[in-house]
Image (cartoon, rainbow, N blue to C red):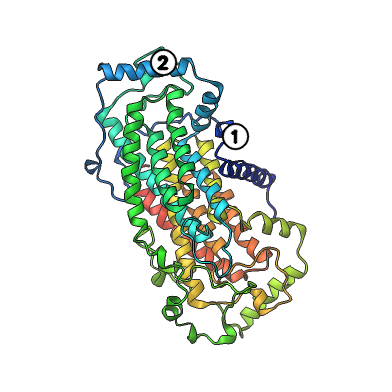
Amino acid sequence: MKSSNKAYVFKWKAAIMLVITFSLLQSCDEDIPSIKSLPILTPTKVDETAGNWKTVLNINASSISLPTAEAISSAAYQAELAELVSLSTNRTASQTNTANYWAAGAVVRWNEIARALVAKYNIAPVVGAPANPNKPFSNPPFAARAYALLSVAQYDALVTSWKFKYQINRPAPASSNASIKLLTPETTLPSFPSEHAVVAEASRKVLEFLFPAEKEYLQKLADENKNSRKWAGANTQSDLDAGTSLGSQVATLAINRAKTDRMSQAGSQTTFIDYFNIARIAESDRWISLELPYRPPMLPLYGKVKPWYDSVSAFAALPPAPPSLSSSEFKNALQEVRTIADNRTREQWRIADFWADGAGTFTPPGHWNLIAQELIVEAKWSEVRSARVFSLMNRAVMDAGILCWYAKYQYYLPRPSQVDPAIKTATGIPNFPAYTSGHASFSAAAATLLAYLFPSNAGQLLNQADEAALSRLYGGIHYRFDNDRGKECGAKIGQLAVAWAQADGAN
């Protein structure tokens, strides 16, 4: 399978963005606004009815408390407008850069920050070292959960903010004072509460929960995001205060769910042996860790983590058993892996490398977040509709991972190079069983949902998912049936996300 030239460009752009964002995380003194790789967001529509869209956490707006919105004619509000006039008239070059950076969209910028954090922490801990909650290992399952939790908090907070925006209906500051020098396009979207402050605070709290050591840095980013709206002339301080309050309250609800989703038990190395009754599989047919020194299997009980889509059940959706190691079907599949490994072409090497997303990267789920971001930016969707994309997709990706991980430890199928040590892999060998393929599962779920939301890109997206799955065969770490069953399971969960999207009121 050949990729288009666009794939090469995409990889280059992805690498550049990752390096830039990662470098920012290494130095809190870096000037973030110097990055200007995205255009200022000018939404094709403001989605006036988004306050009526279905939320994931069933947010009751009446339970959300906000500061009082002062009347436009009040002295307090007039003083806020005067502050914007002064700030916009006297803003520095650095403030201009900051405002332009965040004006590309708070949702996509915070997704970039999350991907960079995942990459920073995607390094396996030293074997035998005690777990450090301040330095989590952001492997693919952890990353899928992180992206989902962030996206849900952003989406639910924005839907709720849209409800308040049109209830309170405070116009944008520039419409009340023509002396404000806007950096961003004029908008009909009501300004109270600020959507940027909503996203900044929800994102800060969720990411701090996931990456505790980054607390100060995340606060710095959130402050810059909020201040940028005053420098741009787009929001008053009271708009920002209301958004901060709302974002914080919704983030707390998302974090409370995360505290009870069973992720804290996913790494148990004793419970899973009893839970899956590993003794039922002949010792000669069992997967073993190929890492030296020996490392226990990765997150063996991730398959028991609570899914986002209620219809997902690891038991009901479990794929059929893989072929037995003594069957001709298995032997033929193993021979295919060996033949590719012995004769791997440059194109197969390229595909295996392009989709590897191993240690030190933002993982396969992060790869699909970057793909989604490019589609969102091109479509010029509003903040709330952009958040909807990430929320729908990342929940599907996480649920696909849950089902995949349940299958892995249910069947405990050895990797190809365990059965045939002569197989030379083109990428690292993951520390968990083979069946089904995580890449195939994640990718099919993401592509199925994105193809629904972006129908003109459907063919390309589904081809990308096929190539992502095939890359693992080319890499020598999966059998073809791992990929085929993984794609089937991922596509089914992607369809659950499509069904949710069809009924959430946003179409």
Residue 64 location, quadrant: top left
Mark identifier at residue 85: 2
Q: Could you tell me how far apart the alpha carbons at marks 1 and 2 are, in whole angstroms? A: 28 Å
Q: Is residue 319 left or right of residue 173?
A: right
Residue type, mark 1 in image = Ser
Mark 1 surroundings: few (<14), some (14-19) or many (≥20) residues within 10 A? few
**Residue 131 point in image, percent of width and height:** 49, 64
In this rendering, is residue 348 above or below 171?
Answer: below
> In the rendered view of the protein, which quadrant contains the N terminus?
bottom right
Query: Quadrant of the image for the C terminus?
Result: top left
Residue 322 seen in the current view: yes
Q: Residue 490's spot in the image, x, y percent?
A: 49, 61
Q: Secondary structure at mark 1?
A: loop
* Three-letter amino acid code at the position of disc 2: Val
Tell me: residue 178, above or below residue 473: above
As drawn, the residue found furthest toward the top would be: 179
- Taking depth in this image into account, of 506 and 29 the one nearest to the observer is 29
Residue 321 % position (x, y): 51, 77
Specify whether 15 is left or right of 444: right
Give the residue at x 41% y 63%. Answer: 263
Asked if disc 1 and disc 2 are in contact, CB closer than 8 Å, the reply is no
Residue situated furthest left in the rendering:
62
In the picture, the disc for residue 37 is 1
Residue at horizontal 47%, vertical 74%?
269
Which one is earlier in the sequence, the residue at label 1 or at label 2? Answer: 1
